[in-house]
Image: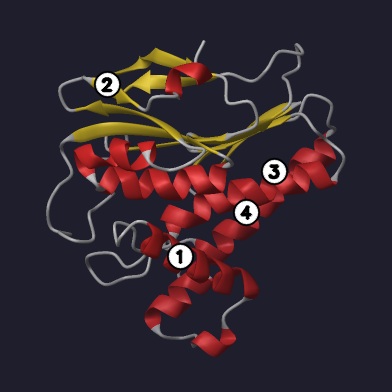
Amino acid sequence: MRDTRIIMGMPVIVDIPTATSDTLDAVFDYFTAIDARFSTYKEDSEISKIDRGDIGAADYSDEMREIFALAEQTTRETAGFFSIVRPDGHIDPSGVVKGWAIWQAAKLVESRGFDHYYVEVGGDIQTKGVDERGEPWTIGIRNPFKHQEIVKVVRPGGRGVATSGTYVRGQHIYNPHVPGTALTEVVSLTVVGPDIYEADRFATAAFAMGRDGIFFIEQLPGFEGYAIDAHGIATMTTGFTQLTL
């Protein structure tokens, strides 16, 4: 069973071949709750209240405490190329929330006894097992200059796949070290990691590094990456081709 709904301002796709509608509803309800807590566009969300100073640290929810801790960890592990504080001073944890939420949703699916699934939010994907045909899940990487064209097909084998870029949402990622400078060297960076949480947080930070990002991914054990620069030239990590068809 497969369904797509717009949540968090982007398409959320859930495909569980042997599931019934109640399981899909549970997953979508989870993402709706995440949006209600972490959306920077909702004035009554917990993150908006924190940003305004309406809620102090002593009153953060457990989920918020976890996200803040994970964000701090990512900042340390990426030499400051990841930050949840935007250049305008507002707090925006979306760079870590999305992958984390997908991973939590995957755990929810597994807790209901399903070992074959596909969960995607805005192009970031966690899969496990096989699709309805009994084939391993495959994921296409789009050409950032021709969105209907697939340039690579990845078979993640249970790993997470996250793509950061400017070709869809424009300049929404920034380098915290030089926050006023547009990121123009790379237009798309896909990261395959042990799970979608790990892939997503490092994809965001690596994209902020510009051309150095793919070399950062190269040095991470258990990660592979595929970058396309502004001239359409692709650079990949040494083990990336082992994941492609």
Considering the numbered disc 2 on the image, is that residue within a helix, a strand or a loop?
strand
Q: Earlier in the sequence, mark 4 or mark 2?
A: 4
The residue under the point 71% across, 13% down is 135
Q: Nearer the viewer, mark 1 or mark 3?
A: 1
In the rendered structure, find residue 234 and report the number of the disc placed on it: 2
The residue under the point 34% across, 33% down is 189
In the rendered structure, find residue 32 and report the number of the disc placed on it: 4
In the rendered structure, find residue 189 and report the number of the disc placed on it: none
How far apart are the alpha carbons under marks 3 and 2?
31 Å
Considering the numbered disc 4 on the image, is that residue within a helix, a strand or a loop?
helix
| Type of amino acid at the residue the image marks with label 2 | Ala
Residue 190 at what x, y percent from top left?
Answer: 40, 32
Name the residue nearer the viewer: 154 or 172.
Answer: 154
How far apart are the alpha carbons under marks 1 and 3?
22 Å
Q: How many marks?
A: 4
Q: Earlier in the sequence, mark 4 or mark 1?
A: 4
Q: Earlier in the sequence, mark 3 or mark 2?
A: 3
Q: Is residue 93 above or below residue 163?
A: below
How far apart are the alpha carbons under marks 4 and 2?
36 Å
Q: Earlier in the sequence, mark 1 or mark 2?
A: 1
| Type of amino acid at the residue the image marks with label 1 | Gln
- Name the residue that disc number 3 marks: 106
Q: Earlier in the sequence, mark 1 or mark 3?
A: 1
Q: Nearer the viewer, mark 4 or mark 1?
A: 1
How far apart are the alpha carbons under marks 3 and 4?
15 Å
Q: Residues within 10 Å of mark 2 (few under 14, many from 20)?
A: some
Q: Nearer the viewer, mark 3 or mark 2?
A: 2
Q: Residues within 10 Å of mark 4 (few under 14, many from 20)?
A: some
Residue 47 at what x, y percent from top left?
Answer: 47, 71
- Name the residue that disc number 1 marks: 73
How far apart are the alpha carbons under marks 1 and 2?
29 Å
